[in-house]
Image: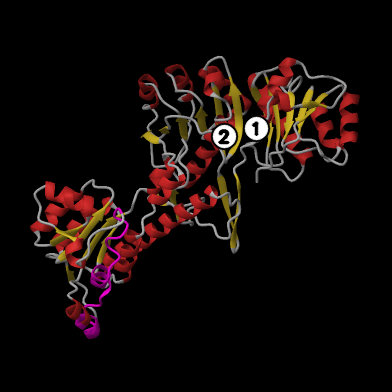
Amino acid sequence: MRPDLVPVRRALLSVSDKSGLVDLAKALTAMGVELVSTGGSAKVLRDAGLAVRDVAELTDFPEMMDGRVKTLHPAVHGGLLALRDNAEHVAAMEAHGIGGIDLLVVNLYPFEETVAGGGDYAACVENIDIGGPAMIRAAAKNHDFVNVVVDTGDYAPLLEELKAGGGATRRVFRQALAATAYARTAAYDAAVSSWMAAAIGQEKPKRRTVAGTLAQTLRYGENPHQSAAFYTGGTARPGVATARQLQGKELSYNNINDTDAAFEMVAEFDADLGPACAIIKHANPCGVATGASLAAAYQAAFDCDRTSAFGGIIALNQALDAETATEIVKIFSEVVIAPDVSEEAAQILAAKKNVRVLVTGGLPDVSAPGLQWRQVAGGYLVQDRDAGRIGMEDLRTVTKRQPTPAELSDLIFAWRVAKHVKSNAIVYARDGATVGIGAGQMSRVDSARIAARKGQDMADVLGLATPPTEGAVLASDAFFPFADGLMAAVEAGAKAVIQPGGSMRDDEVIAAADDAGLAMVFTGMRHFRH
């Protein structure tokens, strides 16, 4: 039976990220560990006054081809892969002068950083590491005898393990390091393959891979009986994954999902064009508004559905100020997310200690390309992110009555909101604010009726003489297959409609709109959201 405790006598250090390297090497040297290193890593260690052997001394072969060839040698891989309890392996090591390597510390060429920094094709290719992944996989395979560290965050745990074991590590510790190492090389290869497919124009490559880094272990998933964790990865974009949390409890699975939906929704409204606020509940907006000030936008969004707003997620497209924070703390909210928060606003929110406050530093670009993944039984669905947007120039009026300039503005607003409402989606809007939202119904007519009912509820709460849907505009995320859905809008008092068009019964729906005196525009684009 192989031993549990294995002493570390020789370490090979070859890292791209030099942070923490010298401190690690000093601690290893103090424990009597011999240091072997390569190129830049060896120079850093020598400059720190540490004794270190070059890999070239082990291989009796110099680094060559600009460092492309240095560790791909039996003296290295034999030292990593040899089974110390196998007589034939030990004999081969002795015959060829191969010394065992008990600890490998490697982090890879900065390929992901090169891509993220806009490196050209040649620069990206040059930053594809070859020797590093080969050594990592070899050491991880031989974890019965070899420790492999690929993350600077594991330097401290490694030293603690060595101190506790008198210079040796336990098998369970080496197994955990090996699992992390294989995940790292898998993620690295995923990044390379994804980049190359995009670089050569492969929209649908034969194989796709996705990788993530554990950001947070969650208490549970959507429900308490479900285990869950939060991983980050892919193209970085401002949002919940990159935000800095100023206060409040740890984010839950549902918090993260809903906050992402909220911030993507509010990002539809350019901060330079004015303040906007979105309030989300269960990944659907219950109120969205623009305004002359952030406080006004928040109030209009809140007024759309005050009941549902309780315990919701509040997303803002501009820095949160004190005036808006004063209004926000009047009810309980799970999360407030904004590009920034003023010091005074932060002090006001601090009175609500359970409210999670996130600062993102910016808004995501909703028109930027990207991929979305969804798991199904036995596979994955992969699609482009819905980056579709329409402007005034894209609208086609199909009715006798032309929409007024004010109606056109509201139609564009309602359309942007409908994009983020679960299908079937109906959104009533007026004066740059939602006044009724119907989401996720099996029938578009039902969504229209629910949205109208929400408008009536809004009137009752605010003491309005008539429902705000009267004189409002309506957005439908997909076409009306029959005129009955349009008639529900007429009953609610809508005066203008925006929809994709494209139904076999478009003529029938247009005729019904003309009979009712509605203005209706087609976008030629739909926004299903399932």
Question: Quarter-wise, where is residue 477 in the image?
Answer: top right
Specify the quadrant that holds the N terminus.
bottom left
Q: Residue at 17% across / 49% down in the picture?
A: 43
Question: Quarter-wise, where is residue 35 in the image?
Answer: bottom left
Question: What amino acid is found at the position of numbered circle 1 in the picture?
Answer: Arg
User: Would you say residue 425 sits in the magenta stretch?
Assistant: no
529 and 355: which one is in front?
529
Find residue 403 and report its horizontal and vertical position in percent: 78, 19
Q: Are marks 2 and 1 in contact (CB under 8 Å)?
A: yes
Q: Residue at 59% across / 28% down in the picture?
A: 306
Q: Is residue 125 left or right of residue 404?
A: left
Find residue 385 and report its horizontal and vertical position in percent: 59, 43
* Residue 211 visible in the picture: no
99 and 446: which one is in front?
99
Residue stretch rendered in magenta on the structure? 66-91
Name the residue tied to disc 2: 366
Q: Earlier in the sequence, mark 2 or mark 1?
A: 2
Classify 233 as above or below 516. below
Residue 248 is labelled as none
Question: Quarter-wise, where is residue 34 in the image?
Answer: bottom left
Find residue 21 and report its horizontal and vertical position in percent: 20, 50
User: Would you say residue 79 sits in the magenta stretch?
Assistant: yes
Find residue 318 and report its horizontal and vertical position in percent: 48, 23
Classify 101 as above or below 22. below
Q: Is residue 160 left or right of residue 527?
A: left
50 and 522: which one is in front?
50
Q: Secondary structure at mark 2?
A: loop
Give the CA separation, mark 2 to mark 1.
9 Å
Residue 389 is labelled as 1
Q: Is residue 260 left or right of residue 242?
A: right
- Colour option used: secondary structure
* Residue 111 visible in the picture: yes
